[in-house]
Image (cartoon, grey):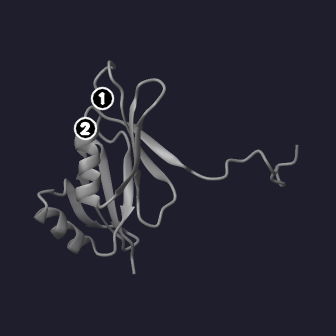
């Protein structure tokens, strides 16, 4: 097998969604809509009984799937387990808008070595959201 040539037809073609399980679907969906302006694209119950909600991000094809699974152990998100990162044009203005809506940054803003500015906000269940203003 040659490592230099890519075999056609055996590669994935696109990232479609990332799924996160939560304890309170409605509370989490409301957070992403209100704090980050994401759009609920569809909501349904899976064949296994999971309550599912799909959220769209501007300028992105992939979605975030939020799942609430009845009769399952409660979600306990350990620190720094995972995070979602979103780009913003002006982090200071975005943080001010968040504060007006009653949401506080949990860390930052911090300027990175590359000149980007980053900050974090906690979503319900303890999942972290990273906000990134790229260096101009």
In the rendered image, which residue does mark 1 sit on?
A: 75
Say which label, 2 or 1, has the lower sequence index.
1
Percent from the top left, x then y, of residue 8? 81, 51
Find the distance from the CA under tag 2 to the CA under tag 1: 7 Å
Quadrant of residue 26 in the image?
top left
Q: Quadrant of the C terminus?
A: bottom left
Percent from the top left, x then y, of residue 76? 28, 29
Numbered mark located on residue 126 in the image: none
Percent from the top left, x then y, of residue 72? 34, 20
Residue 34 shown left or right of residue 52 in the figure? left
Q: Quadrant of the N terminus?
A: top right
Residue 90 shown left or right of residue 51 in the figure? left
As helix, strand or loop, the secondary structure at mark 1 comes to loop
In the rendered image, which residue does mark 2 sit on?
A: 125
For the residues labelled 2 and 1, say whether their Cβ atoms are less than 8 Å apart: yes
Q: Residues within 10 Å of mark 2 (few under 14, many from 20)?
A: some
Number of numbered labels in the structure image: 2
Q: Does 16 appear above or below 92?
A: above
Q: Nearer the viewer, residue 88 or 28?
A: 28
């Amino acid at each position: 097998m040659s490592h230099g040539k890519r075999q056609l037809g055996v590669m994935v073609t696109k990232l479609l969604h990332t799924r996160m399980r939560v304890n309170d679907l409605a509370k989490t969906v409301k957070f992403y809509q209100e704090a980050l302006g994401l759009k609920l694209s569809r909501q349904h119950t899976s064949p296994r009984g999971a309550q599912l909600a799909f959220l769209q991000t501007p300028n992105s094809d992939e979605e975030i799937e939020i799942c609430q699974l009845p009769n399952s152990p409660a979600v306990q998100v350990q620190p720094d387990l995972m995070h979602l990162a979103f780009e913003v044009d002006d982090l200071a203005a975005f943080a001010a808008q968040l504060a007006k809506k009653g949401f506080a940054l949990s860390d930052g803003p911090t300027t990175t070595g590359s000149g980007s500015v980053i900050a974090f906000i906690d979503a319900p269940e303890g999942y972290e959201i990273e906000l990134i203003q790229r260096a101009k």
